[in-house]
Amino acid sequence: MTTREAHGITASEVDEESIAAFLQLNPDFFERHQGLLLRLRLPHARGGSTISLVERQIEVMREKHAQLEGRLAELLAVARANDVVADKLHRFTRRLLLAGSRADAIGRIETSLREDLDAYHSVLLLVGEYPDLAPQRFVHAVSPESPALKSFETLFSGGKPRCGQVRDSQRELLFGPDSAQIASVALVPLIDKGAPLGLLSLGSPDRDRFHPGMSTEFLARMADLIVDALTLRRSA
């Protein structure tokens, strides 16, 4: 006679589902049968030997703790990065607030990009006539009817910054002699009342500096500040 038969229990009367259901309805079962709890053995998570249920629970808790620590470290890294971005945007905003004219604002934009954002390859392409602005490396203007703007129509219609690689013709138009060393680009459309005001282009020799998966919220906010600075401050 088997142990099951001695207790009047047959294999057909007890299955895994019944046991699982019983334990769910009686979560204190092992508290009342602690000796059984210590005798239960489970395969080790890393293979090889077996461990007790208590040891397995401890192991599971350690793994969860390690995962939580990793997640916390990720959140802290994101928070620190956001603090850095917020500080840069704050400095950028303060510079623009001190601008006395549109030309002064453009000079401050270029300085902030270079000194605060480490954007050494930057170009501001303005759409329209700007007789008050002297030609310079950082900024130049094109006519709204210029064929050069055709390749940026989708960008302007979308109104959102885009990061990654661009066509050779676009890179040459924007960065001129420096285009050969530009491996990745951030294009920031400047839209005023639904119409293209200009295009801010940031370039980098690092192919991964500006990539399609990166967040562009910071660039979008910068675009709003630039548009305000250029439209509120006329030539002085």
Image (spheres, grey):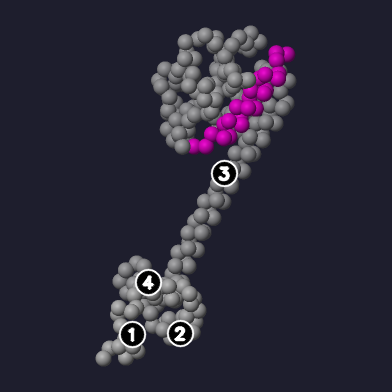
Q: From where the camera sits, is residue 138 visible?
A: no
Badge 4 density bin: few <14, some 14–19, many ≥20, Cα 10 Å: few
Q: Position of residue 79 (x, y in %)?
A: 58, 47
Picture residue at 34% right of the left edge, 67% below the top = 46
Q: Which amino acid does label 3 sit on?
A: Ala
Q: What residue type is labelled 4?
A: Glu
Q: Is residue 83 magenta?
A: no
- CA distance separating discs 3 and 2: 52 Å
Residue that label 4 marks:
17
Badge 2 density bin: few <14, some 14–19, many ≥20, Cα 10 Å: few
Badge 3 density bin: few <14, some 14–19, many ≥20, Cα 10 Å: few
- CA distance separating discs 3 and 4: 49 Å
Q: Residue 9 carries which label?
A: 1
Q: Position of residue 24 (x, y in %)?
A: 46, 73
Q: Which amino acid does label 2 sit on?
A: His
Picture residue at 62% right of the left edge, 36% below the top = 88
Badge 1 density bin: few <14, some 14–19, many ≥20, Cα 10 Å: few
N-terminal of the pair, mark 3 or mark 2, is 2
User: What secondary structure predominates along the stretch shown in magenta?
Assistant: helix
**In the image, which residues are magenta?**
214-236
